[in-house]
Amino acid sequence: MARLMIVTGAGHGIGAEIARQAAAAGYRVGVLDVNGGAAEETAQSLPDAVALVASTTDSDAIEAVLDDFGTPDALVNNAGIVRFTPLVDHLESDWRAVVDVNLNGPFVCGRAVARRLIAEGRSGSMVNISSINGIAPGPNSGAYSPTKAAVIQLTRQMAIEWGPAGIRVNSVAPGIIDDGMSAPILADPEVRATRSSRTPSQRLGTADDIAKAVMWLCSADAEYVNGHNMVVDGGVVHTVLSGMPRPASIDGIAEEG
């Protein structure tokens, strides 16, 4: 019997690539997206995949999805949105929308799947998609950075509460990815070149990079990894001092103590 995986926000971008790699690994994939057409398009491109149409923030809709599809062995909470605005100009409606999708969505979906796995006495794995913005806040990103920081902490809380039941929960923090919501930003050639050159690995990340990390965390090879936030960013979060000047005259000078 095929293992089941549900990937939220899988109608396009990183979610669609995760769904593709999951299908290649032998999972029967539930391609969940609020956009039915996008979910169907991705599902039709994969063997034995099913389009699941629901909002991740609607607990009744998620329960109905699980009734139809079954309890997944793995859940990937990938769905997310951003509203780029300075905080002083940020609309409350936009703030609440981002919090609802980015933070409440993983909670609603994770809780629903965990309840069923525990009731059925089964182990499982979940991966929440966070972001390097949850580690180092991005200016004018509104609620996005705070929600992604919260997702990292939610992941840890899920891990310690559900770990005893055999459910592992980890997160993956993408860096500058050449796909999804970064596409309009990277459409500017100058911005694209700058972001590539300032990444220690000297390239932008891809949806494939993120999907590989997700699939490893869901695999038996990661069976002792729980509550971990895996940063997949080519080294970007470690570059805070690289833009700070230092006089060449002090090179070679060392002090003790």
Image (cartoon, rainbow, N blue to C red):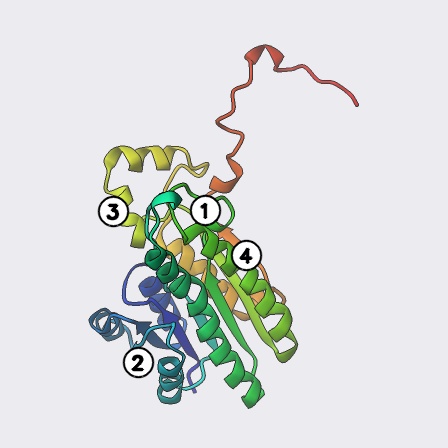
Element under label 4?
strand
Q: Which residue is mark 2?
A: 48
Task: Tell me if residue 44 comes above or below residue 78 in the rendering.
Answer: below
Mark 2 and mark 1: Cα distance apart in space: 32 Å
Mark 2 and mark 4: Cα distance apart in space: 30 Å
> Which residue occupies 36% across, 76% down?
29
Element under label 1?
loop
**Mark 2: few/some/many CA within 10 Å (<14, 14-19, 20+):** some
**Mark 1: few/some/many CA within 10 Å (<14, 14-19, 20+):** many
Q: Which mark is in front, 2 or 1?
A: 1
Q: Earlier in the sequence, mark 2 or mark 1?
A: 2
Between 77 and 197, the one lying in front of the other is 77
Q: Residue 246: x, y in percent?
A: 55, 18
Q: Earlier in the sequence, mark 1 or mark 3?
A: 3
Residue type of the residue flagged with mark 3: Pro
Element under label 3?
helix
Q: Which residue is mark 1?
A: 233
Q: Quadrant of the C terminus?
A: top right
Mark 1 and mark 4: Cα distance apart in space: 12 Å
Q: Which residue is mark 4?
A: 229
Q: Quadrant of residue 93?
A: bottom left
Mark 2 and mark 3: Cα distance apart in space: 32 Å
Q: Quadrant of the N terminus?
A: bottom left
Q: Which residue is mark 3?
A: 184
Residue 164 visible to an observer of this rendering: yes
Mark 4 and mark 3: Cα distance apart in space: 26 Å
Mark 1 and mark 3: Cα distance apart in space: 19 Å
Q: Residue 15: x, y in percent?
A: 35, 64
Residue type of the residue flagged with mark 2: Asp
Q: Quadrant of residue 168?
A: bottom right
Q: Earlier in the sequence, mark 2 or mark 4?
A: 2
